[in-house]
């Protein structure tokens, strides 16, 4: 039954999942392979929000982790599954449990750039200043590096620290400039991001100048 539940969740088959749960399948069932994903992970990976609902109503733990430390909420954020995110947060899933390497669900949503997911996680209490283990990057660094304008705007409105520093001293503005995401420069500068923070690679101003984007950073 449990193996069938995993397959049903992966396929996003609400009818199969409902039948298997009624027949005694364990809502906390997990795969026996090296990944150790649960049925809830599988449902989130498949954007199967109704399967997520059924599992949570059957008391599956919303904060179960796989072998890599990822929660279903992280998987939903990584895949841009807004309805799964909302159902998990309603079930009191923690937005603070990080994947191996310190990447939080909010980092994952910012990397993908789906603004609705970013907003839902912030509303659910995600830490705007969470940092990953290697680069010490915040979600705003991640969104700026990836060039996602709507996600950046949402983080700024929510009060994310504009001048947070990574391990090498980079700010979100520097990340945007370094990756040539010129559309991000104006909103960051209008929000009073510091333009002259010095990193090993220079400042956001010198990086923009080297790319020929001086006008963008004169705002």
Image: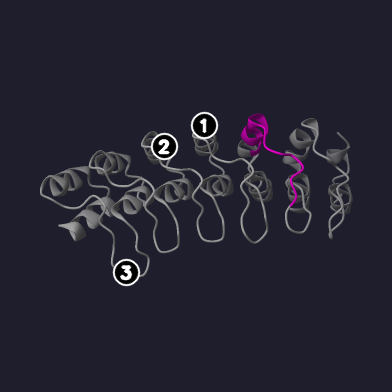
Could you give the CA–CA distance between mark 1 and mark 2, rounded to whole angstroms?
A: 9 Å
Q: Residue 163 lies in what quarter of the image?
A: top right
Mark 2 = which residue?
Answer: 89
Which image quarter is the C terminus in? top right
Give whichever of 134, 195 is nearer the camera: 134
Badge number at residue 18: none
Q: For this view, does 133 lie left or right of residue 73?
A: right
Instruction: Indicate the quadrant containing the N terminus: top left, top right, bottom left or bottom right.
Output: bottom left
Q: Which mark is residue 123?
A: 1
Q: Residues within 10 Å of mark 2 (few under 14, many from 20)?
A: some
Residue 31 image position (x, y, % from top left): 29, 63
Q: Which residue ends up furthest to the bottom in the rendered image?
A: 34
Q: Is residue 110 above or below residue 123?
A: below
The kind of secondary structure element at disc 1 is helix
Q: Position of residue 62 (x, y in %)?
A: 36, 45
97 displayed left or right of 199: left
Q: Quadrant of residue 215?
A: top right
- The crowding category of the residue bearing disc 1, from other C-alpha atoms within 10 Å (few below 14, some 14 to 19, many at least 20), is few
For mark 3, does the 10 Å Cα neighbourhood hold few (<14), some (14 to 19), or many (20 or more) residues?
A: few
Mark 1 and mark 2 residues within 8 Å of each other at the beta carbon: yes
Element assignment for label 2: helix
Residue receiving disc 3: 33
Front residue (pair 116, 132): 132
At 76% from the left edge and 36% from the top edge, which residue is drawn? 188
Q: Which residues are magenta?
A: 152-165
What residue appears at the point 65 percent right and 38 percent down from the top-left corner?
152
């Amino acid at each position: 039954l449990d193996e069938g539940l995993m397959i049903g969740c992966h396929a996003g088959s609400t009818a199969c999942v409902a039948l298997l749960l009624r027949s005694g399948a364990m809502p906390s069932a997990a795969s026996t392979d090296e990944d150790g994903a649960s049925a809830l992970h599988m449902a989130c990976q498949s954007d199967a929000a109704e399967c997520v609902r059924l599992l949570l109503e059957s008391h599956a733990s919303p904060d179960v982790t796989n072998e890599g430390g990822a929660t279903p909420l992280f998987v939903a954020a990584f895949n841009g599954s807004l309805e799964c995110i909302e159902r998990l947060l309603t079930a009191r899933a923690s937005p603070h449990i990080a994947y191996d390497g310190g990447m939080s669900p909010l980092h994952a949503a910012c990397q993908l750039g789906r603004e609705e997911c970013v907003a839902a996680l912030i509303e659910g209490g995600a830490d705007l200043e969470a940092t990953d283990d290697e680069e010490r990057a915040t979600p705003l660094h991640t969104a700026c590096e990836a060039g996602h304008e709507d996600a950046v705007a949402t983080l700024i409105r929510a009060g994310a620290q504009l001048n947070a520093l990574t391990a090498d001293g980079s700010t979100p503005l520097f990340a945007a400039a370094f990756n040539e995401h010129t559309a991000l420069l104006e909103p960051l500068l209008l929000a009073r991001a510091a333009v002259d923070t010095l990193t090993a690679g220079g400042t956001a101003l010198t990086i923009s100048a080297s790319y020929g984007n001086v006008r963008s950073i004169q705002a």
